[in-house]
Image (spheres, grey):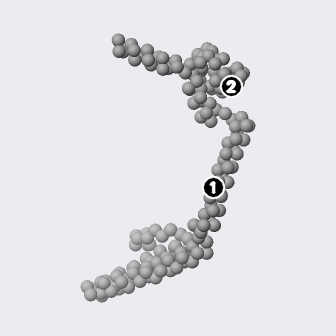
Amino acid sequence: MAGEKSSRARVTEENKFIFSTADTCDFFQVSRETLSNWEKKGAPKAGRGKWNIKTLMEWKFDGRHTDSPGVRKLKAEAALKEIKKEQEAIRLAVQEGKFISVEQVTRELTRKLANLKKSMLAMGHLVASNLASLDMEAAEIAKAEVDKRVKEALTEMAEGRLYRGRTKKKEK
């Protein structure tokens, strides 16, 4: 008995949104011709002369089936408004000082890269001084190798290339 009630409730629930063509036209305030055109464009239909209002509304407002000039114009206008809104937000952010000038960025980046270069060039000396107490010859070899790699990296960065850290096998 309980199974019958739930299946009846399900059928009633599914039929709750089924309207006749006339009622569907009244609901959407469109003519039968418009409803017929929607059907040709892929509008879901429950059967002959029957329309599921719920699925028809989902179809109508999903925006994928309409490509009329009016709809395209509305979409273009909406997109233009969004772009103008974004431009206005940027303009206000500039006025509020939330952005910094290219010159400021260039100055700060130049300063930081110069500091990086100085630190990298000092690496060979630091390695050598730490190894000197163990083996002076190894310290000199390590210093030369580190200096060579650092200079290669800095040169390639300055030329806009990506440093790949060549191994001795590749250098031959």
Q: Does residue 78 appear left or right of residue 129 in this picture?
A: right
Q: Nearer the viewer, mark 2 or mark 1?
A: 2
Residue kind at label 1, given as amino acid type = Glu
Nearest the viewer among 27 and 170 is 27
What is the crowding at mark 2: few (fewer than 14 residues within 10 Å), some, or many (at least 20)? few
Q: Does residue 96 appear left or right of residue 154 in this picture?
A: right
- Residue bearing the label numbered 1: 86
Residue 83: x, y in percent? 66, 52
Q: In the structure shown, which secondary structural element does the residue marked by tag 2 occupy?
A: loop
Which image quadrant is residue 149 in? bottom left
Q: Earlier in the sequence, mark 2 or mark 1?
A: 2
Residue 78: x, y in percent? 67, 45
Task: Point out which mark residue 29 bears.
Answer: 2
Instruction: Look at 63% across and 21% down and name the residue there.
Output: 24
Instruction: Look at 44% across and 19% down and name the residue there.
Output: 10
Vertical comparison of 75 with 93: above or below: above
Vertical comparison of 15 with 94: above or below: above
Q: In the structure shown, which secondary structural element does the residue marked by tag 1 occupy?
A: helix
Name the quadrant of the C terminus. Answer: bottom left
